[in-house]
Image (cartoon, rainbow, N blue to C red):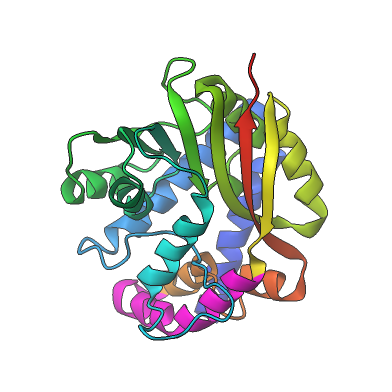
Amino acid sequence: MQHALSRALYRTLRGIPRCFPRRLRTAARLALARRWYDFVNRLDPEGEARFFNYGWIPPDEESDPPWTLERCQAALYSRVVAASLRGKDVLEVGCGRGGGAWWVWRRCAPRFLIGLDLSTGALHFCARNYRSRGLHFVQAAAGSLPFAAASFDAVVNVESSHAYPSLQDFAFEVARVLRPHGVLLFADFRKSSELDLLRRQLASPGLRLEQQEDLTEGVLRSLLVTDACKRALIARKAPWYARAVLEDFAGVSGTPVYTGLRSGTLVYVRLLLRKERT
């Protein structure tokens, strides 16, 4: 009963800011997101969870070595970063605990990489755990990027945009900080009925859609394979009153995201958009 009440409260709070005027709605959602992610980060100071994404497993993939939680989550980055970043200047918006930024830094060899996130706790974790010349972490909101125009060759955005107060603000900021022919490497879930709207919003500030891929089946495979691991991690790390909310957040079986992806009411997509020459 208590788990059900905390879960219901969490879902209700996520909807409350929609009642506010736009400026207050934006401020309220940012404040709520910051507090939530700071709380989640405090639960795991040891760093057992370094990614905040649902993961992905390709079709017909052998299970040896086994698909661990971190391997699934890193595989999602491998699929999303479908462009050469060697020697490029890269920004990840919504870097979370830095697992994805660290993966891109080690595997893709950019010239420099900045990970940006709203959560103070996440950025403190990144500063403690990822130290390399050319890799930096900054705090800011996705709709107000603190960089000059034409600063980056690529922007990476993985499973973060669904929480933004304004996707259009984010899209305009991405287009502003990208250099001509720079790319947005994007992945997230949406209601199936809102997929066309997502594409229009991201493309509207002068970004041209070049690639689109439905990752839903691979994400579902990952959610199934990692379900027991995530439940055990939550049971071990979280106080009792937060466990149901964290299960929602992690997308374990029976939660809204899992059932939505399984039923087809939600879709998980990868997009690559390129900034047109201006």
Q: What is the span of residues highlighted in magenta in the rendered image?
A: 217-240
At horizontal 41% and vertical 31% (from top left) the residue drawn is 140
Image position of 125 with respect to 26: above or below: below
Looking at the rendered image, the quarter that the C terminus falls into is: top right
User: Along the line of sight, which residue is nearer the eye, 205 or 108?
Assistant: 108
Count of picture labels = 0
Does residue 135 appear in the picture of this structure?
A: yes
Look at the image and say whether residue 56 sits in the magenta stretch: no
Image position of 237 with respect to 151: above or below: below
Residue 229 in the figure: left or right of residue 132:
right
Looking at the rendered image, the quarter that the N terminus falls into is: bottom right
At horizontal 74% and vertical 57% (from top left) the residue drawn is 191
At horizontal 38% and vertical 75% (from top left) the residue drawn is 234
Q: Position of residue 126 (x, y in %)?
A: 25, 47
Look at the image and say whether residue 225 sits in the magenta stretch: yes
Quarter-of-image position of residue 119 = top left
Q: Position of residue 63 (x, y in %)?
A: 44, 85
Q: Position of residue 53 (x, y in %)?
A: 47, 61
Residue 131 in the figure: left or right of residue 5:
left
**Magenta span dominant secondary structure:** helix
Does residue 166 appear in the picture of this structure?
A: no
User: Along the line of sight, which residue is nearer the eye, 87 or 245?
Assistant: 87
User: Along the line of sight, which residue is nearer the eye, 165 or 69?
Assistant: 69
User: Along the line of sight, which residue is nearer the eye, 231 or 126?
Assistant: 126
Residue 40 in the figure: left or right of residue 274:
left
Q: Position of residue 67 (x, y in %)?
A: 41, 79
